[in-house]
Amino acid sequence: MGSKLRVGVIGANLQGSWGVWAHLPALAALDDVEAVAVATSRQETADATAQQFGVPNAFGDPNALIDHPDVDVVAICVRVPAHRDLVLRAIAAGKHVYCEWPLARDTAEARTLLEAAEKAGIVHMVGLQARSSPVLAYVKDLIAAGEIGTVRSAGLVHSTDWISAVYPGTEYLQDRTSGAHFLSIPGGHSIDALTWILGEFKSLTSIVHTTRPELKAFGTGAPVARTSADEIVVAGVLDSGAVGSVRLTGASSPGIGVRLEIHGDAGDLVVTGGAGGRGIQMSDLTLHRSVELAVLEPVEVPARYFLTPATLRTNPPQNVGEAYLHLKKAIESGGRASPDFADAVRLHELLDRVEAGAVR
């Protein structure tokens, strides 16, 4: 690896992909990390993406990207069912890996990927980008510094329309077995954000329920089965003794976005993200704190919490850019990235607990 960290992005179709929405704009804004290759399922779509973003190498075969000598890190931004084979292939090639969340279709598969990555000695990161949010990092530090006293309770609400208009190619997001659904994606990101800031659930109870078991395909009206949940509540006691809750609603209304309230015995913090946001990890967040009865004042996040340049201050690319800079530091230091595949396995295990004990 030279002075720059060189990234190859698998899953970057201009017609709609997380690689194009988040990864490539983030990489284009960074000085120390760059995109050197993209891969899609067809050469012509890879060429189109490479041309738009000024990426020198384009491949219709992800294996060619993985094997390219200029690629230091393989970023896997495709659908969850394809993660396992691509991650294992990149590990076998000796490449560092940034894999989007969910890491795998289930916990057993995630453990397989963690074991392979640890055995190979590569640096691995999972795309739980809420942990890279400067706003949430500042919140975490304020709490640790005792700025609101002892935290007694916290609640995160995320409300959004979860793909109620089923466009071609999005059917898998309604399928529980795909590993990519309402609980695993917005649920996983939301629960991870809460527990990263405040600590793990010591005990929990949950509701995992499907209110709309049948949707309609956009344009044709053909029925589409929803086998995954669209209304979820998780509540319990955290290791600290505080009470924590996460409520996710994926009905067909636009929703209110994200609201995280953290209540201490010396004050409160409130984090909000605008309506229509797909999750706390990809929303532009604002922070307020209580100053007196019924009064909240805005809180500015100190500049030191931003690693990315001032030109990268909107999401989803901002948090992804922050994550890449954390990854570069881990590779240069020979340390662990955060969050890594071990963090992903713990979150998969927690989601298993949520489902196993759920009232339906």
Image (spheres, helix red, strand yellow):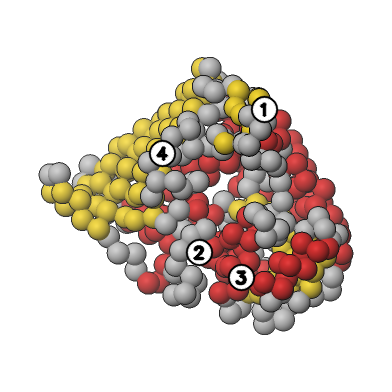
Residue visible at 84% across and 73% down in the picture: 69
Q: Nearer the viewer, residue 175 or 331?
A: 175
Q: CA distance from mark 1 to mark 2?
A: 38 Å
Q: Secondary structure at mark 3?
A: helix
Q: Are marks 3 and 1 in contact (CB under 8 Å)?
A: no
Q: In the rendered structure, which disc, 1 or 2, sits on the residue that comes first in sequence?
A: 1
> From this viewpoint, which residue is outermost toward the front?
220
Q: How many marks?
A: 4
Label 3, residues with CA under 10 Å away: few <14, some 14-19, many ≥20: many
Residue to which mark 2 is pinned:
318
Q: Which mark is residue 255?
A: 4
Find residue 129 and report its image quarter.
bottom right
**SS for callout 2:** helix
Q: To which residue does mark 1 refer? A: 222
Q: In the rendered image of this protein, does residue 208 appear above or below residue 78?
A: above
C-alpha span from label 2 to label 4: 23 Å
Q: Dot 3 corresponds to which residue?
A: 27
Looking at numbered disc 1 in the image, what kind of residue is underneath it?
A: Ala
User: Residue 143: where, in percent of width, then height?
Assistant: 33, 52
Mark number displayed over residue 130? none
